[in-house]
């Protein structure tokens, strides 16, 4: 190993070494989000399959609640800017900004589907859900209002659990809509949510390098994830049922995703999966 004096001598004689920068653990995520940012949003009209009135009503209500959820992530940006501890660096901050922008794009896609749903058939009391009602939904209060009382680490943990719900819920609803354009757009969101889940998962193994800390994060993660998934199943159970999706299957999908999250928090994300 080089001594301090030897290292100084090398820097004096070979100054090109001074500009060597260590790679960030967030480089792969940043590259992924930058690629997604460069893709132009589709302007094609979103079409829907034939739906019964009750299916349309319940789907509209669920999508409006999910849309509100996609717009609630920006508040953490200012807090992250003030943090100086590892693993927060400039690449992480840039990645988080692009992450939040991508969530906004998801909200716009959901808004387009909602607009199409509202244009079909006569409105019923169930479909007339407004902004105030969606903000008072159980999941909104759990994920977004309660987060205002939390520190950054716990907020990121809740964000992680919200992405579990996004991954599975959008996949279930996209299958329910079949080969329609609306189903395809929901599957696009679901594919993005896969990386959105990996992104906060990677934060915790980097934050707690020692095995004991990773176990502690998993002990915190499991009850939050279970509560979040139970809440969403309870709130959207009528939507799942009306599209003939057994609640047992929904619970099974959520549980498998929760276990995957536990593994990632414990071991981190393989680099080939963070691209």
Image: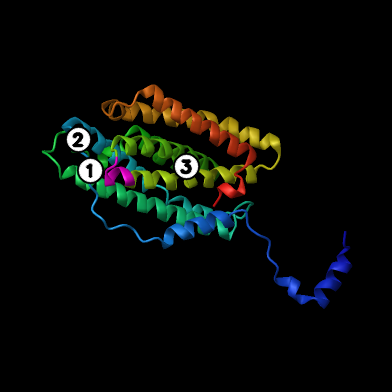
Residue 172: percent from left, percent from top: 36, 34
Note whether 40 is above or below 227 in the view shown. below
Q: Is residue 15 left or right of residue 147?
A: right
Observer-side mark, 3 or 1, equals 1
Query: Total marks drawn?
Result: 3
Binning the other alpha carbons within 10 Å of mark 3 as few (below 14), some (14 to 19) or many (20 upward) gives many
Camera-side residue of 188 and 101: 188
Which label belongs to residue 51? 2
Quarter occupied by residue 163: top left
| Residue located at (48% from left, 39% from top) | 158
Q: Quadrant of residue 20?
A: bottom right
Give the left or right position of residue 214, taking residue 111 as reference.
Answer: right
The quadrant in which residue 244 appears is top left
Marks 3 and 1 sit apart, C-alpha to C-alpha, by 30 Å
Q: Name the element at disc 3.
A: helix
Question: Which SS class for mark 2?
Answer: loop
- Confirm or deny contact between disc 3 and disc 2 (CB under 8 A): no
In the image, which disc is placed on residue 159?
3
Whether residue 180 appears in magenta in the rendering, the answer is yes
Q: Label 1: how many residues lie within 10 Å, few (<14), some (14-19) or many (20+)?
A: some
Do the numbered discs 3 and 1 sit on residues whose CB atoms are within 8 Å? no
Judge whether residue 144 is colored magenta: no
Spot the residue most to the front.
Answer: 179
Q: Is the Cβ of the residue at disc 2 closer than 8 Å to that at disc 1?
A: yes
Give the vertical position of 239 relative to 267 (above or below): above
- Where is residue 82? Give x, y as percent: 55, 56
Q: Main secondary structure of the magenta part?
A: helix
Foreground residue among 17 and 172: 172
Q: Which residues are magenta?
A: 179-184
**Does residue 52 lie above or below 92 as drawn?**
above
């Amino acid at each position: 190993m080089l001594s301090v004096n030897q290292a100084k001598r090398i820097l004096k004689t070979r100054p090109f070494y001074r500009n060597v920068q260590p790679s960030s653990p967030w480089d792969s995520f940043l590259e992924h989000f930058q690629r997604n940012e460069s893709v132009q949003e589709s302007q094609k009209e979103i079409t829907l399959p034939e739906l019964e009135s009750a299916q349309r009503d319940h789907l509209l209500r669920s999508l409006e609640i999910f849309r509100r959820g996609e717009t609630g992530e920006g508040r953490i940006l200012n807090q992250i800017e003030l943090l100086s501890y590892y693993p927060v660096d400039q690449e992480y901050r840039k990645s988080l900004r692009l992450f939040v922008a991508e969530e906004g794009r998801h909200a716009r896609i959901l808004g387009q589907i909602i607009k199409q749903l509202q244009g079909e058939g006569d409105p019923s009391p169930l479909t007339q859900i407004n902004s105030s009602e969606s903000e008072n939904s159980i999941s909104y209060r759990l994920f977004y209002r309660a987060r205002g009382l939390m520190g950054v680490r716990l907020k990121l943990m809740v964000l992680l659990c919200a992405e579990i719900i996004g991954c599975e819920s959008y996949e279930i609803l996209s299958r329910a809509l079949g080969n329609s354009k609306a189903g395809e757009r929901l599957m696009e969101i679901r594919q993005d949510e896969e990386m959105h889940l990996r992104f906060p998962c990677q934060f915790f193994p980097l934050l707690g390098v020692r095995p004991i800390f990773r176990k502690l994060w998993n002990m915190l993660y499991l009850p939050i994830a279970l509560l979040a998934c139970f809440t969403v199943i309870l709130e959207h159970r009528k939507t799942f049922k009306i599209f003939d999706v057994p609640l047992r299957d929904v619970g099974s999908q959520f549980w498998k995703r929760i276990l995957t999250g536990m593994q990632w928090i414990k071991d981190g994300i393989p680099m080939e999966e963070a691209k």
